[in-house]
Image: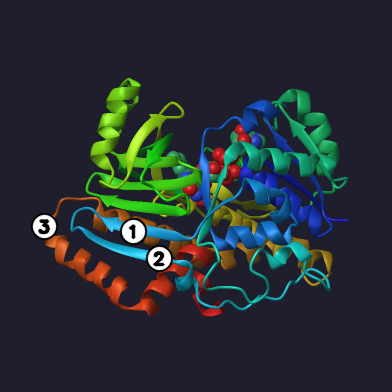
Amino acid sequence: MSRARVHGAGPTGCLAALALAQVGWEVQLDDPLELPVLLRRQRAYALTHSSKGLLDRLGLGQALGPQLVPFSSLELMDQGTGRQCHFSSADLGQRRRRPWPFGAEEPLAALGAAGPGSGGEGEAVGWIVQHGPLMELLLLQLQANPQVTLHLGRPAPGAPATLAADQAWDQALDLVVGADGSQSASRQAAGLGWLEHTYGQACLTVQVRLRGARPDQAWELLRPEGPFAVLPLGGDAFQLVWSASARRLRQLESLDGAAFLDQLAGALPDQLQPEALLDQPRAYPVALALAWPVAKGQLVLVGDSAHRCHPVGGQGLNLGWRDVACLQQLAGRVTAGRLNPSQLAGAYRWRRWPDLVATLLATHLLVGLFSNRSRLLLPLRRLALDLLNGAPLLRRLSLAAMTQGPCRLGQR
Ligand SMILES: Cc1cc2nc3c(=O)[nH]c(=O)nc-3n(C[C@H](O)[C@H](O)[C@H](O)COP(=O)(O)OP(=O)(O)OC[C@H]3O[C@@H](n4cnc5c(N)ncnc54)[C@H](O)[C@@H]3O)c2cc1C
């Protein structure tokens, strides 16, 4: 049986461990954080169809179902030009099912709510899931999986207490997966490059109750100070991801509840009225970054250890889970004897770069085009939104790029 060590039990590392186990690998997963800390992050993720497809193939779609909040439309609004574009499930088009490469039958759960060959009216455009319930499910599945050994709350690998045990297990290791976040020790130890661009923006997350908002509608507001996402959490609860300069967000963080809601009312369109804060606003730095290369020797990087992007369009975690899907496909070939384990990292490196570069570039261009007050760019922005509104095919292609990744357009 092939062996892998996964460093980092964030959402990407946990999924990578489950994906490798599913194709017959023995996996050790370690993280210096204890379980309660791993569950605690205050964040909700917008999941795309590429992520939902992977969850379904891993047999997690049904168990996670009650925690997924589907949205059937996405409202894109450029507040600089007043133009708006409405994406609905009709813009998903009809999708072909891709063949399941790991065994005769794709798990039944993979059929999802809308069934085979699904797409079109009635299907969700995307789903929102909160970090806590997602991680709880992933960690429960890992604990129950006989092929996975979990080491949580240990010192980071390489510390003296763990060195002997690590060395014994590592003697027959085929693969090391670095899923240890943007400060990745795995990446640094391997001497891989890290190309990084920091934005003049940070982003603030907060959960609120809104009046006037539909519970099945998500919003991406393109504001001159930065993009602003409104993501439904069920009922009248919403997660907001508010991008602006770090200075402005620090000021917002320091306001009391009533003053924060006043500022929020000024940022949202008139039909969305903030009623109450459900948690504490928190600001995070944002950056565009790419490890180069994303794999070397026995090491493969996945998730934020390999790349970071601006949260516009909610692409970060979804891109990391597409890393996992690619890794699983290659690991499945190793199990089937069709790929030498020593060739896995090289194959991964070449397969991932088009999706990584295209997605990072797309988010960067969106931020560059819309997060400014330049009058010169206004005609271009009007044209872009008018084209999207007037051409259903363009709307469909844009939504496909967002939800399946820019490099899968031809496969829909
Ligand atoms: C405000 C905000 C909103 C976002 N919204 C979305 C969204 O809507 N949709 C979306 O797709 N993405 C979103 N993202 C991006 C998403 O949060 C990240 O891409 C995702 O959390 C990355 O997960 P990860 O598992 O790769 O890394 P992390 O979540 O950073 O996990 C890394 C893990 O590695 C562990 N670790 C660290 N060092 C070591 C070590 N030496 N050895 C072992 N383990 C180690 C850490 O303890 C941690 O548990 C958002 C990001 C921000 C900032």
Q: Pick whichever, 142 or 337, lies toward us.
A: 142
How far is mark 2 from mark 3, CA to CA? 26 Å
Ligand 1 has an atom within 8 Å of the beta carbon of the residue at disc 3:
no
Q: CA distance from mark 3 to mark 1?
A: 20 Å
View quadrant of ligand 1: top right
Q: Could you say which quadrant of the image residue 108 lies in?
A: bottom right
Residue furthest out toward the left? 375
Q: Quadrant of residue 77?
A: bottom left
The N terminus sits in image quarter: bottom right
Q: Which residue is mark 1?
A: 76
Query: Residue 17: percent from the left, percent from the top?
Result: 73, 48
Of mark 3 and mark 1, the one earlier in the sequence is 1
For image coordinates 20% across by 50% down, the residue present is 372
Q: Taking the image as drawn, is residue 182 in sight?
A: no
Q: Is mark 2 within 8 Å of ligand 1?
A: no
Q: Nearer the viewer, residue 228 or 344?
A: 228
Q: Give the secondary structure at mark 3.
A: helix
- Mark 2 lies on a secondary structure that is strand
Q: Is residue 65 above or below residue 53?
A: above
Label ID, residue 375: 3
In the rendered view, tell whether residue 279 sits above or below residue 75. Answer: above
Q: Is residue 225 left or right of residue 309?
A: left
Which amino acid type corresponds to the residue marked 2 in the rendered image? Answer: Phe
Height in image: 16 above or below 390?
above
